Image (cartoon, grey):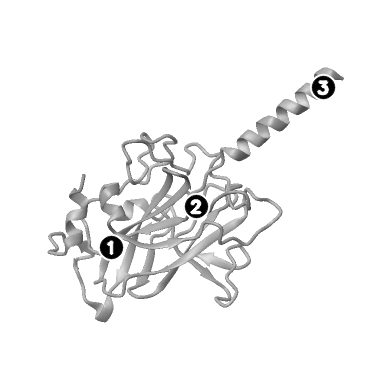
Amino acid sequence: MFFRTTIIASATLALIASMADAHSWADCVDWRFNNPSKPDYSAKGGKCFGWARQYPVNSGIAFGGLDDASPNRHYQQGKDMTPCSDGKHGVEPGADETRQSPISKAYGGKWGTMATVKAGDQMCIRWPAKNHAVKDEVDRGVFINMPQTILTKDPTQSGFLKANIAKLPYKGCNFTSNSDTTPCGGCFTVPASLTTGTYVVQWRWELNPGEFYTSCWDLGVTGAGGDSSTTGGKAIGGSTSVFAELAEDD
């Protein structure tokens, strides 16, 4: 009896540890509600129209389950603060979310589609709670960082921080009985001044003080008046905007 009790207790502790170690990521970066007056991030409440870089939409893994995949989807930044997971760096390396050349290589086929939007419109993002939307945890928020110019490479984390456009509550959830796979999300407004082109966006969640998880994606924007900053569908660099220098920040 003692042996059996010990086995059960050990299994219970392992389950608790597993739950405590579950961390989140941006599941959908362009979530559209069936009824905008009643925001619902569950499968019955809307549909996804855009995903983060190289997001395995055809994996067959249910919502919130990609932390059990190999590679898993959650990426915790390390001391080097690599802004978008490369699958190698970080406390938790995560999957490959580096910028691809061309950008389109990160989307379509086995990957999800790239998000598109009109400048000035609202966008909503979804993520799984992963047991961290509970009452006894401090909500330090999700930061949406988006340089407002077309860059030839991703900025450093310092560059992303200078381009913060929104802070969302982490616990904006449609609570269910399963605190691991409860769907959560938040919305932000895409800057209205953007010209037509492809931009980079970072979702950055602070779980504990100084403990950050990120997801990155490319966003196709139709600017005000259809003003174009692209040629043949490819982004042009060399903007004189102050944000153009973000990619070079240390």
Task: Select label 2 or label 3 by which is in front.
Answer: 3
Query: Would you name the residue on which mark 2 appears?
Result: 57
Q: Secondary structure at mark 2?
A: loop
The residue under label 1 is which amino acid type?
Thr
What percent of the width, then of the height, locates residue 70?
50, 36
Query: Would you name the residue on which mark 3 appears?
Result: 4
User: How far apart are the alpha carbons under marks 1 and 2?
Assistant: 22 Å
Query: Which of the two labelled residues, at mark 1 and mark 2, occupies the earlier sequence position?
Result: 2
Task: Select label 1 or label 3 by which is in front.
Answer: 3
The residue under label 2 is which amino acid type?
Val
Q: Residue at x 21, y 57 (%)?
A: 151
Query: Which of the two labelled residues, at mark 1 and mark 3, occupies the earlier sequence position?
Result: 3
Q: How many marks overall?
A: 3
Is disc 2 in contact with disc 3, using a CB cutoff of under 8 Å? no
Q: Residue at x 61, y 62 (%)?
A: 42
Q: In the drawing, does residue 22 fall left or right of residue 143?
A: right
Query: Would you name the residue on which mark 1 appears?
Result: 198
Residue 100 makes an appearance in the image: no
